Amino acid sequence: MAEYRGVDFYRLGDALSDEERGVRATVRRFVDRSFLPVVREHFASGTFPLDLIPELGSLGLLGPAVEGPGCPGLGYTVYGLICEELERGDSGLRSFASVQGSLVMWPIATFGSDEQKRRWLPELAAGRRIGCFGLTEADHGSDPGGMETTATPDGDGWILHGSKLWITNANLADVAVVWARGPEGVMGFLVERGTPGFSANPIHGKWSLQASDTGELVFDEVKLPGSARLPGARGLRAPLACLNEARYGIAWGAVGAAADCYQTALDYALARKQFDRPLASFQLVQQKLVGMLTEITKAQALCLQLGRLKDRGINEVPLVSLAKRNNVAMALDCARTARDILGAAGITDEFSPGRHLANLESVKTYEGTHDIHTLIVGAEITGIPSFR
């Protein structure tokens, strides 16, 4: 396999610090050497490469921007670069890291007690424990405020009842960050594997995110101690803040998937001959390649500026929504165009664009659909919410 050198037409890498470039190079090597040789096997079998989790932890790729015991404590631009390289490998790989860091470690660090932080953060950062995030329900996706899972007071503790669906890492998780409706509105809890009444069921028949674990969480009158509650999480704003962290990583990750599709199509077009000429010599093919490169470059600039803003403490939801919305749609278009350039070869797993295309259909939907992010940005620029 040829060494991947990245797609950087506008030399945006020159604006990165030595640390940022160093971390990117480390993740790039990890993806090339450890992940890409096995992704086809795992995508075909519908499994996640569990043996790579310790390496993800040892490299500091789990919760890199989270601050707390045992956490790497890196910046947001670094986190974005990590997501870009991970999703160049596969959306399932980036999804695992996003859930572990942004949706499990971040809420524990932000809303958890000191005891919860000390117990869970070092284990999660090292990959010795795995987490998942339970917000979406079968009947409540874009409207999480309508959740039906309940938390009922029970002496000094709580009784959790309900279910969550489409949960990444559901069947792998040692702990679930679960959101339920209680007497104080939406509340957050940490539910450990093995707790009586708590079970996880895999979702079968997926044709997208095959190299990722997805399942259902069921809570059948689960009794929790008072210490299981995330004390700082009050109201729907808490889980939505977690989603904003994850959406940030998705915006970067989608660029990685698009860049891989572009590079694969370019390499193929240069090597493939038709009518005694390289495919890349035809005007229509060049037009497609230039269109892909243009959109990738624009998305890279969007991500870099967004990362710099977050590093400065500017963490506005509409900014992240615009980037997630634009970049995932862009990556989908690049995957389709790359598949087209590859012709029949593009529908086989020998080449990555078909796999990215299938994955990105899910990425466009989760962590806020394309339409929901459109409405978030629309409400920001007009001052008129149009969700209802």
Image: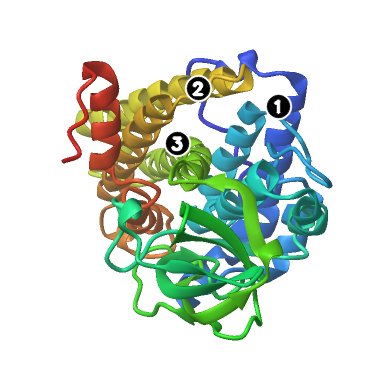
Q: As displayed, is residue 71 above or below residue 23? A: below
Could you say which is closer to the camera, residue 261 or residue 341? 261
Could you tell which of marks 2 and 3 lies nearer the N-terminus? 3
Could you say which is closer to the camera, residue 219 or residue 21? 219
Question: Is 115 displayed left or right of 109 in the figure?
Answer: right
Location of mark 2 (residue): 306
Residue at 63% in and 69% down: 157
Element type where label 1 sits in the image? helix
Q: Position of residue 50 (x, y in %)?
A: 66, 70
Badge 2, how many Cα within 10 Å: few under 14, some, many 20+?
Answer: many
Location of mark 1 (residue): 21
Q: Position of residue 331 (x, y in %)?
A: 35, 40
Location of mark 3 (residue): 251
Element type where label 3 sits in the image? helix
Residue at 48% in and 52% down: 184
Q: Which three-letter amino acid code belongs to the residue tagged 3?
A: Ala
Residue 174 lies in what quarter of the image? bottom right
Residue at 46% in and 46% down: 235
Question: What is the C-alpha distance between the residues marked 3 and 1?
Answer: 19 Å
Question: Is 333 displayed left or right of 49 in the figure?
Answer: left
Would you say residue 167 is visible in this rendering? yes
| Residue placed furthest toward the bottom | 196
